[in-house]
Amino acid sequence: MLFLALIWAASAVAAIASQSKTATKNTTIDNGPFPTDLNGSNFTYPHPFQLFHFGSQGLPLEMAFIDLPPIVAPTTTTKPQRVRYTRKKPNPKPKIALLLHGKNFCSITWSTTAATLQKAGYRIIIPDQIGFCKSSKPGTLYQYSLHQLALNTYSLLSVLDLTDPSNNGITVVGHSLGGMLATRFSLLYPDLVSSLVLVNPIGLEPYLELGVPYPDLSVTLKTEQTSNYMSIKGYEQSNYYLGAWAPEYNVWAMMLAQIYAGTEAQNFVEGQARVVDMVLTQPVFYEFPRVRSKTLLMVGTKDTTAIGKQWSPPDVKEKLGRYELIGKETANRMPNCTLVEFEDLGHAPQIQAPDRFHAALLQWLRT
Ligand SMILES: *[C@@H]1O[C@H](CO)[C@@H](O)[C@H](O)[C@H]1NC(C)=O
Ligand SMILES: *[C@@H]1O[C@H](CO)[C@@H](O)[C@H](O)[C@H]1NC(C)=O
Ligand SMILES: *[C@@H]1O[C@H](CO)[C@@H](O)[C@H](O)[C@H]1NC(C)=O
Ligand SMILES: CC(=O)N[C@H]1CO[C@H](CO)[C@@H](O)[C@@H]1O
């Protein structure tokens, strides 16, 4: 029995090892050109993007991603160069920042942050997760987990040759659902993540433990199927933006509404329902004390986002989404966390007040 178990374990180890090797070998990066409507999203990305073709769960999938180089300020020296005695320094590897989008956003929502970090010397990688935006929509065929999305992201970095520990690690920035994913990514690949930045992440509280009734997938699916521009705008206006509305909020609501109405609508909502289930059933909440990466937690404290609040009874509802409390509680539970609070901002400080947000981010990254 023990002997069989050992053989089984050994072959499982070999299978996983060879799988991770072929996972990186059997992949391609596609530079396009791509149709305007790509996997159900017709939003025009102002940056060039690429498609990562890879296999996952037995399916051939495509993950869209943006890869931007650091912007090096031109050196304006007027002194004559003393070429003879200058030792040529090896070109230092650029710092890497990985930006992870939220459930109601896409890679492209990070464009202002990306531009800021490029100027600070970072190469920027921004994926659209599987099931989202311009990436494949495997619908009911895919088992969504934060671990799987983290693994997909790791595979992309690996193909781009960015997982070598000698690269000095990666700065991972995640917003909303992307913050939950960034936390999971850091737990799975602690040696790779040198800095972790969480921007109004969801999952700072254990929704089900606090009394959110667990919904059957068909219930979540129904909600997703009725999503449209008006419901998205109403939800974001009250939960994200303190009742205000502006063109810079509207652009992302329009982008999302088009996917809900687009050519991959059915597969999209099947995926989104599973993503809600993933958020409820796969908390990172209990593992914050285990996060080793140096962390910056950035919180607009007027945010009221909480998954399941809409269908919770009043006594549960009033406990949820209290970002003025849960930011501080989380920072205290993480071993190496700096908390920055924006007392007048909501769920998306990088969209609401980009200048203040980026000043705080750069200040922390420099220390
Ligand atoms: C995307 O689709 C929407 C809805 O069908 C349409 O109104 C919009 O013009 C399209 N945008 C582009 C860039 O094709
Ligand atoms: C590898 O790629 C080939 C060609 O695209 C495909 O037929 C095969 O199924 C892929 N294998 C895996 C393990 O993804
Ligand atoms: C936090 O992380 C930084 C950078 O890795 C390290 O220098 C510092 O010692 C850490 N602090 C604690 C309390 O672990
Ligand atoms: C599932 C699906 O339709 N995937 C498509 C995503 O877009 C790429 C590029 O056009 C296609 O090759 C995939 O078939």
Image (cartoon, rainbow, N blue to C red):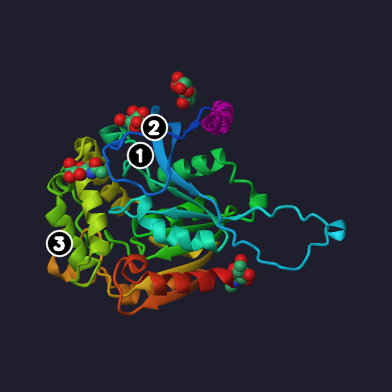
Q: CA distance from mark 2 to mark 1?
A: 8 Å
Query: What number is the disc on residue 135?
Result: 1
Label 3: which residue? 234
Residue 223 placement, left or right of 38: left
Is 176 above or below relative to 4?
A: below
Q: What range of the chain is rendered magenta?
A: 1-25
Q: Please rate how many residues cluster around mark 2, counting C-alpha atoms within 10 Å: few if below 14, some from 14 to 19, many from 20.
A: many
Image coords of residue 272 (percent x, y)? 25, 45
- Tag 2 or tag 3, which sits nearer the N-term? 2
Could you classify mark 3 by the number of other residues whose Cα lies within 10 Å: few (under 14), some (14-19), or many (20 or more)? Answer: some
Earlier residue among tags 1 and 3:
1
| Residue at mark 1: C-beta within 8 A of ligand 4 | yes
Q: Residue 69 in magenta?
A: no
* Observer-nearest of 310 and 367: 367
Give the alpha-carbon distance from disc 1 to disc 3, as whole Å: 26 Å
Mark 3–mark 2 contact, CB under 8 Å? no
